[in-house]
Image (spheres, rainbow, N blue to C red):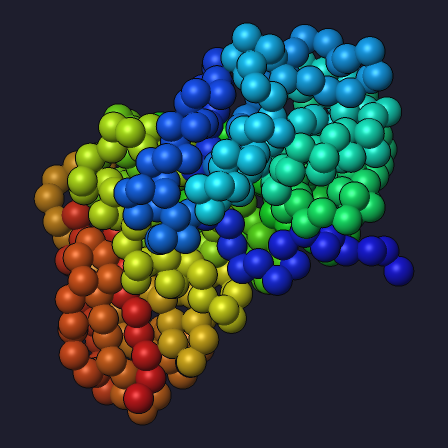
Amino acid sequence: STPGPKSGCHVLRFLSWWCCLPVPSEQLFVEMADVMAAEGWRDAGYEFVCIDDCWMAPTRDEHGRLQADPKRFPSGIRKLADYVHSRGLKLGIYSDVGNKTCAGFPGSYNHYDLDAQTFASWGVDLLKFDGCNSDTLELLAEGYRRMSLALNNTGRSIVYSCEWPFYLRPVQQPNYTEIKQYCNHWRNFFDVYDSWSSIKSILDWTALHQDSIVKIAGPGGWNDPDMLVIGNFGLSWDQAVTQMAMWAVMAAPLFMSNDLRHISPEAKWLLQNKEVIAINQDPLGKQGYQITKDKNFELWERPLSGRAYAVAVLNQQEIGGPQNFTFPLTFLGNGLACNPACAVQQVLPASRDWGVYSWVSSLSVEVNPTGTVLLKVGAL
């Protein structure tokens, strides 16, 4: 039998802040850790501060080990990890399965055990393992397996974030059962960008492929639709609500890619919304899915613990004003979500009690263009 990933096996989801700036620096991560601890992010559940590509020196040291760029990380990663831990947070780092990272820095190929030991010795808590510059699909798969085992062999709990299926998909259908044996979460689709077209493409892709990806998600292994870009510049308020609502329905790891030092109160409220995070982190651990599409409207549901459901009504229309979507409650939970009656609570775009409905009732939901209304439906 294949050993599964120890890292995060009992972790539901991963909430964190992720830097993907072209030139990350030690000072940036210190400041972000301070903000996360002081301004409610850690208390809301965001616990990882993660470094993306470009943190490394251009060459390994004389012992073959990865080393941080000495100008941008003068104290080294160990000291940074210690500081992040002192703020009650965890540190994530980046490497690549191939010869080089996507940005051209040293990759982990032929150094999997050494790099895993190095990360563990630094006190790293999460590894994002990219898939650039691997010569063949066989080497790609072997590298992802070997790094998983190498991380386990360190004895340190290190969450393992993979891009394995994304690099496989152009050529072959990923074996998600195998991938979940080795990885804690995995990317399936292109990088997110700070734009509505990017968010829309991720949602469209997920709905198109839900039959193959939804069933594998659960505690210990998750589909990762990439980072939350709420709090930047590219999304309207309604589009930000849509990303937060749909990432909760999709049981996505909540990784923020933004500058928490300069974030609006509205974006902070949305990203720290306890009701939405509770849906995202629901202990049942089932991923949601699209149940119907009618013209510009999409209806999604996610089974929750306690026989409840999260329900999202998404309006893909990009022009005009708010529109109504009406659907029978028998659509939900194979007809059982509201049997014989249910309480409906609106979570987004604002919290509001909708009252009690019978099994034969319909709901009419008004949704802004590119917006989403997120509901929680609980049977009585």
Q: What's the residue at 76%, 35% (across, down)?
A: 116
Residue 142: x and y in percent read 84, 36
Residue 274 visible from this viewpoint: yes
- Is 1 situated above or below 359? above
In the shown orientation, is residue 237 left or right of residue 42? left
Quadrant of the rendered image containing residue 146: top right
Picture coordinates of residue 220, whole percent (x, y): 63, 58
Q: What is the tally of numbered marks visible in this picture?
A: 0
Q: Is residue 155 above or below residue 352?
A: above
Question: Which corner quadrant of the image does residue 276 belong to?
Answer: bottom left
Q: Quadrant of the C terminus?
A: bottom left
Q: Quadrant of residue 110?
A: top right
Give the answer, above or below, for where 351 lies relative to 125. Answer: below
- x and y percentages locating residue 230 in the rendered image: 31, 37
Query: Which residue does the image show at 81% across and 41% down from the upper left?
Result: 150
Residue at 63% of width from left, 17% of height from top?
A: 68
